[in-house]
Image (tube, rainbow, N blue to C red):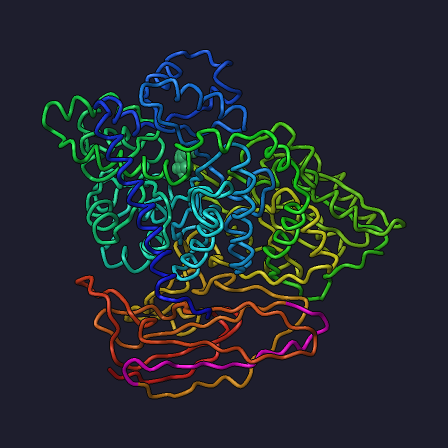
Amino acid sequence: MKKYSLSFLLLIFGISISAQKSIDQKVTELLSKMTLEEKAGQLVQYSGFEYATGPQNSNSKKVLEEIKSGKVGSMLNVTGAEETKAFQKLALESRMKIPMIFGQDVIHGFRTTFPINLGQAASWDLEMIEKSERIAAIEASAYGIQWTFAPMVDIARDPRWGRVMEGSGEDTYLGTKIGLARIKGFQGKGLGNIDAIMATAKHFAAYGAAVGGRDYNSVDMSLRQLHETYLPPFKAASEAGVATFMNSFNDINGVPATANKYILRDLLKDQWKFQGFVVSDWGSIGEMIKHGYAKDNAEAGEKAILAGSDMDMESNIYMEQLPKLVKEGKVDIKFVDDAVRRILIKKFELGLFDDPYKFSNSERQKQQTNNLEHRKFGREFGAKSVVLLKNEKKLLPLSKSTKTVALIGPFGKEAVAMHGFWSVPFKDDAQRIVTQFDGIKNQLDKNSTLLYAKGCNENDDNKSMFAEAIETAKKADVVIMTLGEGHAMSGEAKSRSNLHFSGVQEELLKEIAKTGKPIVLMINAGRPLVFDWAADNIPTIVYSWWLGTEAGNSIADVIFGNVNPGGKLPMTFPRTEGQIPIYYNHYNTGRPAGKSTDRNYVSAYIDLDNDPKFPFGFGLSYTDFKYSNFNLSSDNLKGNQTLTINVNVANTGKFDGEEVVQLYIRDLFGKVVRPIKELKGFQKIFLKKGENRNVTFKLTPEDLKFYDDTLNYDWEAGEFEIMVGTNSNDLMTKKIVWEK
Ligand code: BGC
């Protein structure tokens, strides 16, 4: 590490303290000049949906007047340098001339979209994930955006929940690492830089645990579980300096998250010392009335501000109610001041007071409209997110000179769908996206032919297009089928009770299989689907999510072997919906099923094997990896020692390839029961064919800590299993004792 002199460090430290101090002073000054109404105004966020093309085209004058009179602190869904500028001008007509912040759901890319977030998580590639958010920030900030409502760091163990597509899956460790990579990517070198945007840790908290996987539903769980599984990514985000948090829609143990003082004020703001501000979710302050937690707008506003929600997204309650509540003595002005202060600090940090139009630069926007470097990265990232589930007959990779290939299925020529849910719509989307058909066609040799038949629409209940598809398949040497669920069948408010391919797609697959032609089954989906028939009967299956702008090129790179797939599942794939919720790091029960087929008075279903269809962390490669020489530095440790774990991984197959080496532990006996395994480390390594490498992990007592039933966070002496391998089900195990 470079050495700096003490005086140099003091100078740098001193400068940053004085910069911070001056922001604090400026905010204090501003606050002292603001009326109560102007303060409430800073806490208001409006959507610009109906003003998407700029204020001049709006037919509602009310919002424009409110902006001009300082009653709006932020807008979302206004995109574009000119558009944001026009709105900002209105804000600067207000008495205090406080600029607005423009927010947007930049969830998996912006002009260049990347795989849906769950697909990105399957890459287990933290560097690429960070880079994708860096790119998203560069593009979004060039379009006038300073704030993204991402990352979603909700842990989710229920694929019925449509928003699993937006997160990093079921595991707390992986989800935390990915969340941090995303925040780093968005916020770049720090707010104030022209290409850094504020990130949002959302949805606080436990939104992913909605009962039954039904969106917006209640969450009822022990505080221990909340702290152990759902809160760590949020805590880490706060520590990493994420600029904002967003409430979740659900109640937690009976108290809506939006007015949950325990999580917002006691944990986030007091214990974790979070420095940013909290925005409500869309209308979530007002929704507390329907929850049955507030009888009217006044009570909803009062409860939300007292609990610690700082900005009101689209409930229109803070402006209407807060001045009154303060005057009536129901809300102490210090709560309003604290919320305004937090928001103003961010506006200063972003540099908006120095130049309110700094993000509204048409020249920059033009440069980022079709950034080819970003697209190139998107193509690579897409391929890295693909998970190879089966390749029994080594059909993949296909030869580019395969004479006749048929592409069959509802998604083959889809363009906009390749974005997946949550993309900012642009008029030219259909022209910019590489379809799966085009991607495959572009890579096939000139003398080869790519045939196409849709076979059915994603939600058809009739088979009128089957005959054509069967005829097309018969003409081909290889059939690539693209099946799954529609791109808008996952995402917000897209819970499903039936996770099979939608419509008649499975029947189509069975009909095509009858032709006897070799099939590559590509599955497009935003969540783990249930495809038991296909998984048992089709030897070649690739899980390809929604891969974004470059989808077709990415998938073709995998199919033809330019890229050897190395993705690993970030969620457990169930056999049927009846197994849900199913996740790898469960407790053992007093009657665990020894084998997956055990049914007799053990914790199992009488009509179903106990194990999942594909386990967490699973994914194949075109090459083979062999694990050996698994050894530990000691099997008896004491106190603060470090355990070193070594394993050799060899590429014994015929292709260069990447492997995600995974480390799990089990704490065998504890004062509360511990999961049967917990991910504690992973490394993604690239090995040329014939190459091998020693992979090393380290564990310290810090990695053994857990929350007990009094929320005490510590580790216990005792026996542990250390497990290393290629997925959560295929592991080598050694036992150790760790004493205090
Ligand atoms: C979603 C948030 C999103 C917000 C703004 C809400 O419906 O739950 O995740 O950021 O809308 O679009």
Asked if residue 137 is among those painted magenta in the image, a careful observer would answer no
Residue 41: x %, y % from top left: 29, 24
Dividing the picture into quarters, in which one does residue 410 lie?
top right
From the viewer's side, name the closer residue of 151 and 523: 151
Residue 455: x %, y % from top left: 70, 39
Quarter of the image that includes the C terminus: bottom left
Give the left or right position of residue 10, taking residue 323 as reference: right
Magenta segment range? 638-657
From the viewer's side, name the closer residue of 47 and 211: 47
Compared to residue 718, the image places residue 610 above or below, namely: above
Q: Residue at x 46, y 69 (%)?
A: 2
Q: Residue at x 47, y 14 (%)?
A: 58
Compared to residue 521, the image places residue 286 above or below, namely: above
Give the left or right position of residue 307, taking residue 532 as reference: left
Dividing the picture into quarters, in which one does residue 462 lie?
top right
Residue 326: x %, y % from top left: 14, 26
Q: Say whether residue 230 is visible.
A: no
Compared to residue 577, the image places residue 38 above or below, namely: above
Where is ligand 1, by quadrant? top left
Residue 228: x %, y % from top left: 29, 60
